[in-house]
Amino acid sequence: MHKIAEWITQELLMRRVFRKYKNSLPTQSVSEKPKMNYHVLADAIVWNDEGIEKCDPELENALRYALNYRTNLIVDKNFVIKKKNSKRIEKRTFELAKKYFPDWIGFERNRCEYNSELSDRIKRIRKVSQWKIEKLMNSDEFE
């Protein structure tokens, strides 16, 4: 029962935020070669032309699950067909975001499908990020 209540609460919060900022994300790139960046809190990649760094923090927070899901679509060729991923909040948020931001550049097909070159790059980025986090957490600063 607790899981259902949590799911409904998350869904309602996402809908409220997405409705508030509906269609506020860029639909076209202003950059000829957009730069890919790593979003640590979402464990996801974003391109600098997607408006994530410039959007309201409330919207950025709400998009984290969708960004993570999208990154996993790029990284794992079989991500969609894996049963464990069919009802996750990341997928639900991704689908919900697509309804409120249908023309967002971040939902272009080439940014939402498996790409072996990007997959390898993202895996390396995640590995380095994890190493940096572990190094920071094990440092004397946190004792």
Image: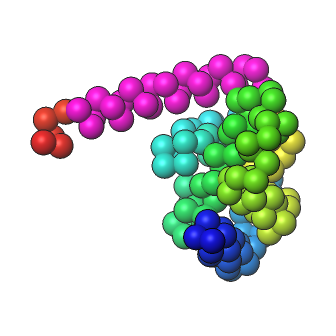
Which quadrant: the N terminus?
Answer: bottom right
> Which secondary structure type mostly characterizes the magenta part of the structure?
helix
Classify residue 49 as left or right of residue 115: left
Which region is colored magenta?
Answer: 115-138
Percent from the top left, x then y, of residue 67?
66, 49
Classify residue 19 by image quadrant.
bottom right
Q: Residue at x 76, y 20 (%)?
A: 116
Q: Is residue 136 left or right of residue 58?
A: left
Return the residue nearer the eye: 15 or 5. Answer: 5
Residue 33 sits in quarter: top right
Report x, y in % for residue 52: 61, 56
Q: Residue at x 64, y 46 (%)?
A: 68
Q: Is residue 13 above or below residue 68?
A: below
Q: Residue at x 70, y 29 (%)?
A: 75
Asked if residue 12 shows in the view, the reply is: yes
In the rendered image, residue 26, in percent from the top left (x then y), is placed at: 74, 59
Q: Position of residue 64 (x, y in %)?
A: 60, 55
Report the residue that reaches farthest toward the front.
Answer: 1
Q: Quadrant of the C terminus?
A: top left
